[in-house]
Image (spheres, rainbow, N blue to C red):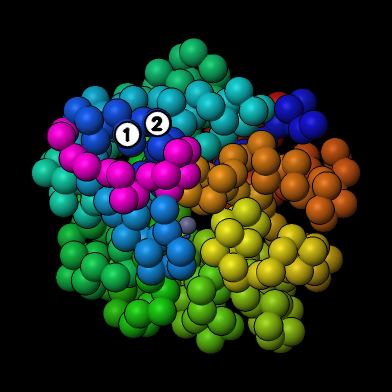
């Protein structure tokens, strides 16, 4: 049991956090048939490509500001009940636009959901605007400009998700420059479904302080050393990685080896209902499968808070809770 451990999450996609029951009710509301996508309480997918398609289909069912307010409120409330004190969620204006929702209304809805969760459960939240690698690089520049305009006080970071097997971070360097110049924190997905070269590509072209996943850096000892030396924080999502068959099981997962190599590691759920997980389950797994003690788990939360894209006053207040 890790309910008593204060937790912080810095890698969760809000559209990927929608429980199947909520998506079913959204589908009913908008008259969309989702039977091919949901079986009982699980999403139907078989590999990374079909996972991304299922994710896009679920996202298409959130269409109004209030839909997103409810989604953010219910997600933050659920992890607060598992002991979370801080939540950064990845958000995607491209997905909102595709669902017919104006990006400003999207961000306002998400911000309102975070405000409600903070009021009821005390959980602090921030929004990381992401572009999508398998959409196109010009769209990414528009998304970066939107993020750089600081559309909401809770928007504090910029990142990229999507299909890492496509293109290079070089194609998105301009978008990341726009976001960095506006003072936003920078993270990006790399070293998940592609290997060490992809991590090096990300470091070279977008200079992130954090990496989404990064776990396949383990295939290159010199890269592991570099990540440790530079203090790059890995947003590790073990349940997601095993579910997507990056590793055969938790006993093969590199979390312990990366941690022992001196890399700053954190625990996250990525897209929890897609991978039958939750932030609480990730902490419990780290205890049971990786042998982390209560103190080790709290240290992981501390790393997440140190790496969080948040103002220093809020960071100090959060760290004081540990
Ligand atoms: N695990 C993941 N990798 C890349 N992009 C994503 N978008 C949502 N989940 C993702
Ligand atoms: Zn992710």
How many numbered discs?
2
Instruction: Let me know if residue 100 is in the magenta part.
Output: no
Figure check: 134 above or below 52:
below
The C terminus is located in which quarter? top right
Q: Residue at x 87, y 51 (%)?
A: 291
Residue drawn at x 16%, y 45% is 99
Residue 102 in view: yes
Q: Position of residue 278 (x, y in %)?
A: 59, 40
- Residue 122's quadrant in the figure? top right
Tell whether 296 sits left or right of 149.
Answer: right
Q: Is 275 displayed left or right of 65 in the figure? A: right
Q: Residue at left 24%, top 25%?
A: 66
Q: Quadrant of the N terminus?
A: top right
> Which residue is tagged 1?
24
Left or right, 206 with reference to 203: left
Establish if 223 lies above or below 85.
Answer: below
Query: Residue 32: within the magenta?
Result: yes
Mark 2 and ligand 1: say if the CB distance to the nearest ligand atom is below 8 Å: no
How far from the left and from the top, in percent, is residue 180? Answer: 37, 61
Label 2 sits on a secondary structure element that is helix
Crowd around label 1: few <14 · some 14–19 · many ≥20 (10 Å) = many
Q: Are marks 2 and 1 in contact (CB under 8 Å)?
A: yes
Residue span colored magenta: 30-43
In the image: residue 114, left or right of residue 63: right
Q: Residue furthest top?
A: 120
In the rendered image, is residue 153 in sight? no
When asked about the image quadrant of residue 173, the answer is bottom left
Task: Say the numbered circle drawn on residue 21.
Answer: 2
Q: CA distance from mark 2 to mark 1?
A: 5 Å
State the SS at label 1. helix
Q: Residue at x 29, y 79 (%)?
A: 171
């Amino acid at each position: 049991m890790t309910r008593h451990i204060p937790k912080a999450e810095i890698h969760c996609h809000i559209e990927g956090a929608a429980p199947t029951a909520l998506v079913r009710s959204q589908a009913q509301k908008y008259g969309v048939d989702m039977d091919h996508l949901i079986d009982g309480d699980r999403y139907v997918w078989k590999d990374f490509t079909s996972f991304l398609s299922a994710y896009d289909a679920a996202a298409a069912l959130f269409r109004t500001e209030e839909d997103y307010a409810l989604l953010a409120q219910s997600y933050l409330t659920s992890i607060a009940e598992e002991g979370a004190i801080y939540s950064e969620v990845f958000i995607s204006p491209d997905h909102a636009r595709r669902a017919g929702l104006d990006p400003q209304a999207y961000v306002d809805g998400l911000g309102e959901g975070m405000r409600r969760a903070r009021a009821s459960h005390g959980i602090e939240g921030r929004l990381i605007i992401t572009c999508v690698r398998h959409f196109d690089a010009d769209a990414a520049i528009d998304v970066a400009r939107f993020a750089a305009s600081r559309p909401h006080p809770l928007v504090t970071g910029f990142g990229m998700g999507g299909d890492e097997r496509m293109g290079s971070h070089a194609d998105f360097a301009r978008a990341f420059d726009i976001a960095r110049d506006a003072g936003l924190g920078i993270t990006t997905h790399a070293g998940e479904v592609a290997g060490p070269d992809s991590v090096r590509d990300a470091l070279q072209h977008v200079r992130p302080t954090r990496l989404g996943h990064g776990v396949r850096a383990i295939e290159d000892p010199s890269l592991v050393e570099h990540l440790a030396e530079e203090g790059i924080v890995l947003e590790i999502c073990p349940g997601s990685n095993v579910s997507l068959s990056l590793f055969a099981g938790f006993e093969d997962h590199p979390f312990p080896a990366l941690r022992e190599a001196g890399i700053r590691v954190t625990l996250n759920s990525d897209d929890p209902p897609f991978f039958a997980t939750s932030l609480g389950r990730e902490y419990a797994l780290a205890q049971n499968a990786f042998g982390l003690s209560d103190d080790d788990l709290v240290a992981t939360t501390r790393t997440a808070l140190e790496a969080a894209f948040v103002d220093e006053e809020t960071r100090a207040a959060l760290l004081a809770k540990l």
